[in-house]
Structure formats: structure tokens, C-alpha cells
Image: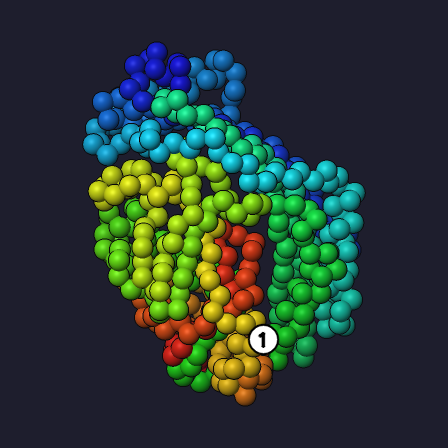
Amino acid sequence: MEIAVRRGADQTEAAASYHEGLSVTVRMGELESVERQKDRSLGVTVYRNRCKGNASTGDFSAAGIEAVVAKAMSIASFTASDEYAGLADAALMAVDPPDLGLYHPWELDVETATELALRAENAARAIDARIDNSEGATATTGAGTSAYSNSHGFSGSYATSSHALSASVVAKQNGALERDHWFSAARQAGELLTPERVGELAATRALRRLDSRQLSTRSVPVIFPAELARGLFAHLVAAIRGTSQYRKASFLLDSLGKRVFAELVDIVEDPLIPGAMASAPFDGEGVATAPRQLVEDGILNGYVLSSYSARRLGLTTTANAGGIHNLVVAPTAGSLESMIAECGRAFLVGELLGQGVNIVTGDYSRGAAGFWIENGEVAHAVSEVTIAGNLADMFERIQAIGSDVDLRGAIRCGSVLIDGLTIAGQ
């Protein structure tokens, strides 16, 4: 930043990061790959007369830093002036950011990682003779630090870690093959599921998909399990992101203060949950993060904004430069099993295929496989169907949100029951 100011920048910001990790994969009882990762980057953004220039490098030498600032200044000299460009307001910068307990490194060597991956795969293959093949099991660890500073005088950094175990296997019966997987992810290695449990879940999920049948086209309640339900709320985020709003490319355009969900839906964004996968003390612009009620009784209370998109909309940044931080969807029902039992007849989604979601119109059409629920129990597996609807209508038709909350990502929600969706089949 000192170099940028010396070269004539009105405002400037810089972000540096370093990350290293290890990933070990085994397949069919043998070591398949070992990957070591070491990444570092320095990004510099400059503003001069509201013209913006940005450049990045992995060269941390004095000459490398001089060069990347020169490149950013050069780019700014060719860009058009933008009245909305610039740093986030100085008054919004984080003061004394809290330690959220996001850094728990795991001293994992190749031998131990191989053992863990083998335990997961062996557990999966031992479940049933119908587990015919394996796509592998993987143990992964990673940790790093990110730092950000700007010419308001803000400077902050925090370290994070992330660890995972996964397994993917293939089940075979009567010539038919079905594949499924499972994974566990956490900031702390001690919070991961055991390798045996990861393998058992992967195998069980593959086995239950055998002997699948098709369905005739019908309109029925549809249950999205927690790991797939979070995708529904990811579509919400895409629709209320500032860029979608000011570009008028959203099915929820100008929806602030309006009902967009069934009344039972409450969503909080809480960036300050200790140890959570998407917690952060400040966003990518140094703005202090804080909990907020995003949706209350189905009514949308805010958008997802950076300082730039907020200015375009005449609003204030929501500290979402870089993404959302722990979207927490409040449960309204019991476990997935209890939701199935109470449904009578329904379709339980097992897998979604394709990218048939239009955020501009809300049209939703995705290939799917899953399970037919009859009399509150799984009757048989289902393949080759399409779930069709419109997200605006789907949000309003949410009947229940389960207590089986998936904590592995930025969206923390349970299974979701939506009434009256079209399942297109035979």
C-alpha cells in the first residue's frame, strides 16, 4: 500500500494469503495418490480518480511487490471512472476482531493419512458382498492464514484449518451398478466422523439405491435431505446477491421486506459461531461481521452485499464481500426419519443431476434419483426422474425443516419438505 500511495493511488487495499495441505487417496486397498499443496498469493487493488486496477502475484520478493503494484496502477489508468468504486466506509472497519477458534492444525503425515483412508474404504467394502468396486477414499488436511489491509488504516488477519475424510463406492446387483459416497468435514480433526463410520455410510447409501424403478409423472410432496436442501438456500443467496439485484437478474428482484418463504421459515446469518466452517471476524473488505436476521417469518429482511453492490442499490454493505457466513435455517420439525414417517406418500431425493436452475426466472428443473415413500416408509429406490417447479413457488410451499442440521458448509440446515412438486417420469 505504501508503494501504491507513492505511485499516486487515492485509495488502496492489499490481501495476502498462505495455505498448505495434504491429500491422500487410496483405491481398492492400495495407495493411489499423494498430493501436497502450498499456495500463496498477494493481491493489490488501487483506486485513482474512481478508476480501479487490480493485480495479483505469488512473488513475495521486493521486486515482485513493486511489479504487482505497477501492474495494478497501469490497469487503473485504462479503466473507466466508476462513481461506486472505492473502499468500504472507514466507519465500518472491524475493531479488535474476535478470535473465533478457526485454526486447529492437524499434523497428518502420509502414513497416517493412508491408514485412515484405508480404514474408511475397508469398512465400506466389508459391509456387504454387493459392494463391488470403489472409487476411493481420501484423507485431507489443510491450514493457512489470510491477511487484509487498506488505506483507511485497517489491518487484520486470521488463520483457518479444514480437515476431511471421504469414501465413494459402487454397489452391484443383477448387473446394475449404483454409486454413492459420504464425507465428514470439520475445523478440528477430532470432530470428524471415524473412518469406519464414513465408509459405512458411503456403502449403505450405495446399497439402498439398488433395484431402482421409474415413476409415472405425478405431483407429490418432495423431501430434500439436509445435504441437498442447502442447495435450495444457495439459490436464495444467488437471487439476493447484490450483483443479481442491481443487474436486475433475479426472480426475487426488489423483494426486500416482502414474503418470499412460507411463514415458518426463519434464517439467521451468524458469522461469529466459534469453529464453524464459514465463520469470519471481518469480510474481504475489512468490514466487521455481525449476526443478522436475514429471513423472519418468511419475510426477507436483507440482501447479500459488498460495498460496491450496496452503493449501486443505495444501501449499506452487509459485510458479505467474499461470500456468506453461516446461513442458519431454523428447524421446525424432527429428524428426517420422523418427516418420512409423517408424509405417507412422498419422494425422497437421493441425488440431483444437471444445472437446470434459472436464477433470473426461478425456473427449476433437475434430474434426480431417490426413493419412493409409501405409508411413511421407503418402498423402493427411484431413478431417471425430473423435479420441476419454480423456486418462488417452492419457497412458499415449504412445509417443514428438519432438525438433522448439516454443519459441513456455509449453509446450516436440516432436511426440507416441499409440498406439491411435479415429478416427471414415465
Total labels: the figure holds 1
In the displayed structure, 393 sits above or below 221; it is above
Q: Can residue 136 be seen in this view?
A: no
Name the side, left or right, on which 150 lies relative to 77: right
Q: Nearer the viewer, residue 321 or 262?
A: 262
Q: How does the figure colour the protein chain or chains?
A: rainbow
Q: Let me know if residue 239 appears in the view.
A: yes
Q: Nearer the viewer, residue 178 or 359?
A: 359
Describe residue 260's horizontal placement relative to residue 331 as left or right.
Answer: left
Q: Residue at x 62, y 62 (%)?
A: 181
What residue is shown at x 72% (from left), y 73% (from top)?
130
Q: Residue furthest top?
A: 6
Name the residue at 43% across, 51% down: 269
Q: How crowded is mark 1: few (under 14 residues within 10 Å), some or many (20 or more)?
A: some
> What residue type is disc 1 on?
Glu
Image quarter of the C terminus: bottom left
Return the residue at label 1: 337
Label 1: state its secondary structure. Answer: helix
Residue 330 x %, y %: 46, 62
Residue 84 percent location from the top left of the image = 23, 34
311 versus 192 height, above or below: above
Name above or below for residue 237 compared with residue 380: above
In the image, 244: left or right of 376?
left
Q: Which image quadrant: the N terminus? A: top left
Q: Report the residue at 54% width, 72% height from top.
A: 334
Q: Which of 28 and 120 is in front in this view?
A: 120
- Residue 221 percent across, percent down from the top left: 44, 79
Q: Decide if residue 242 is on the left or right side of residue 273.
A: left
Q: Within the image, what quadrant is residue 19 found in?
A: top right
